[in-house]
Image: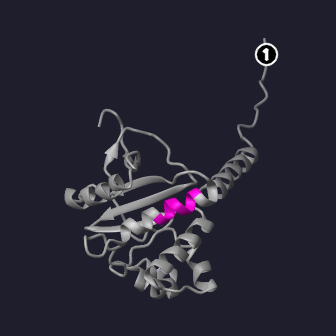
Amino acid sequence: MAKLKMSKKSTKVDMTAMCDMAFLLLSFFIMTATAKVPEALPVETPASTVQTKLPEENLGTLSIANSKVFYGVTGREVRVETLKRMGEKYGVAFTDDEQKKFSLIDGFGVDIRQMKQLIAMKNEDRMKENVQPGIPYDSINNQLTDWIQISRNVTKDLDQKDLDIAIKGDAKEEYPTVKKVLDILQKQSKNNFFLVTGLRSEDF
């Protein structure tokens, strides 16, 4: 009896649909990803398993590293009004253009009397190492206290609520600098604040 011959089917697989799906996913991730914003003071935060998310609005951030303290607040209106009031307190007048440029700066670390020079710089120059020496916070010239207090007052006036504070300290930073910042907050009766840390696994 003759054997039946089975027709051979092609083993070719059309990958067009798979390629389309891969490119769609790739495009989605590229368009929805957020690039890391350059920091004026790079901070290597300590690791923690806590995953509390920082508020995206109504937040003042204190960055501490190399005995320097930088400060920044969210909200352009809050930034501008805080700069105005700090300028009035220290006798420094800022133009409308300078105020507009300052509203785009996330964080800074200079004496208020050097702020005009900082604002005039290009962003890439402003971010260079050692360009900003940090905000003065010693007993003779404690501008950090005024920045925090005035930004809190501005937030209350504009948004009718207190400003949340986050401390972003470098893992290798010595305690005295951190203690001075904590003392400033405690003197302003600000005892609740966020501590920014990096994420690590629980079995690290």
Check disc 1 and give the amino acid type: Ala
Residue at x 58%, y 73% (from the top left corner): 80
Closest to the observer, 3 or 76:
76
Q: Secondary structure at mark 1?
A: loop
Quadrant where the C terminus lies?
Answer: top left
Residue at x 78%, y 11% (from the top left corner): 1
Residue at x 26%, y 60% (from the top left corner): 180
Q: Position of residue 61 (x, y in %)?
A: 44, 59
Note whether 96 is above or below 52 in the view shown.
below
Q: Is residue 201 magenta?
A: no
Q: Position of residue 173 (x, y in %)?
A: 24, 59
Q: In this figure, which residue is indicated by the disc labeled 1?
A: 2
Q: Residues within 10 Å of mark 1 (few under 14, many from 20)?
A: few
Q: Position of residue 162 (x, y in %)?
A: 52, 52
Note whether 73 is above or below 8 in the view shown.
below
Closest to the observer, 13 or 164:
164
Q: Position of residue 147 (x, y in %)?
A: 43, 68
- Residue 14 appears left or right of 88: right
Closest to the observer, 112 or 149:
149
- Asked which quadrant contains residue 2, the reply is top right
Q: Is residue 154 magenta?
A: yes
- Residue 52 appears left or right of 188: right
- Residue 111 appears left or right of 27: left
- Asked which quadrant contains residue 175, the reply is bottom left
* Total count of labels: 1
Closest to the observer, 122 or 202:
122
- Residue 123 appears left or right of 140: right
Note whether 121 is above or below 66 in the view shown.
below
Which range of residues does the magenta coloring cover?
150-156
